[in-house]
Amino acid sequence: MRRVLYVFLAVLGIVFESRAQDPQFSQFYAAPLYINPAFTGASTFTRVGANYRNQWPSLDASFVTFSVYADHFIEKYNSGIGMIITTDQEGLAGLKSTSIGLSYAYQLKLNDNIVFRPGFQMSYTSRNVNFTDLVWGSQLDPVTGFDPNLPPDPTLTPGGSSVSYVDMTVGGILYSKSLFIGVTAAHLNEPNQSLIDENSPLPMKISVHGGYKFMLKSRTLRRDLTYTYKERSFTPVFQYKSQGPFQILDVGGYLHLEPINFGFWYRGFPLKGLETLSGTQFPQNAALVFSVGITTNDMNIGYSYDYTISDLSVASGGAHEFSISYFFKLGTPSRVPRDRWKIPCPKN
């Protein structure tokens, strides 16, 4: 029962306080325009993709996120343009968010070995909730749990059921053929996201992410006319995120044995615990993440599973995530060449 109460309290905190945490993808490099607008056009081709995540499916307070994106590299202007649409439904409150964003990035070659890509994204977000489905704090009894006969807290009576706002994000990526590191600052304008009559700014989110690709020596020739070797590589990666009271660090790595990818990393190292409305502290989304995927010349497909190791344990159902992306050259029927110099980050 305590775990369920924690979920209720966390959902209330997300809806009614300025503690909201953005949706997250475990396969963060498979959601390029979501993690950093500087990835826009980074494939140097036309790319379309989608990401789906279902977190805590065994609980009523599940979180479902879906994102679809498309971007294109304009070689003449060294620029990438793109669009991303993200929908998110959070927990028992039925809080729904839909965001449409347009992004731009410029590719600047600093020297023969290093490239810098600054990026910018502007998005429009709409949030709405069905207040009749909410569980109010005054309806939670510490002994019996939820009691629908108890009245809702009159001080939290909503003044509206929807809100919309414009949001701005900037980012940058510095990379070579093996090393890459990026920084993103989201919600620069900290828009008011409150669904009730109060000011509740969406906290700015800072993300730092990067990695290094190590090429392995044991390789075999591809079965085509390129006379090149199949890629065998290991890429340790990290992602640090800070938003409001949340600070999370993901660390792990990807093993690529062409065409198969294997990933394993740990999400946690909470520098701050999340405090619920009752004053209880509990870890922030601590989990072990396992992934597997297939990468071809022009397509990436990935699946990952989050094994929850916090107090919610396996009863939450963890999180299932799928990703897919497809690359092509507009006006050219040929496949994407392998020797195109791109950011060496993993695809899933």
Image (cartoon, grey):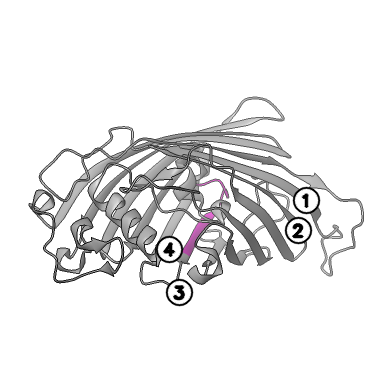
Mark nearest the camera among 3 and 1 is: 3
- Label 3 sits on a secondary structure element that is loop
Amino acid type shown at disc 2 = His
Within 10 Å of disc 4 (Cα), the crowding (few <14, some 14-19, many 20+) is few
The answer to whether residue 44 is magenta is yes
Q: Which residues are magenta?
A: 40-51
Label 1 sits on a secondary structure element that is: strand
The residue sitting at the bottom extreme is 58
In the rendered image, which quarter is residue 174 located in? top right
Q: Is residue 233 left or right of residue 221?
A: left
Sequence order check: which comes first, mark 1 or mark 2?
Answer: 1
Give the secondary structure at mark 2. Answer: strand
Q: Earlier in the sequence, mark 3 or mark 4?
A: 4
The disc placed on residue 256 is: 2
3D distance between C-alphas at marks 2 and 3: 32 Å
Residue at 35%, 44% in the rendered image: 279
Of callouts 4 and 2, the N-terminal one: 4
The mark lying in front, picked from 4 and 2, is 4
Quadrant holding the N terminus: bottom left
Q: Is residue 138 visible?
A: yes
Q: Quadrant of residue 86?
A: bottom left
Q: Which numbered dot is residue 3? A: 4
Q: CA distance from mark 4 to mark 2?
A: 38 Å
Q: In the image shown, does 325 or 263 lie closer to the viewer?
A: 263
Of the numbered discs in the image, which one, if any, rests on residue 58? 3
Q: Which residue is mark 1?
A: 234
Which of the two discs, 1 and 4, sits closer to the camera? 4
Where is residue 51 shown, x and y percent of the image?
Answer: 48, 63
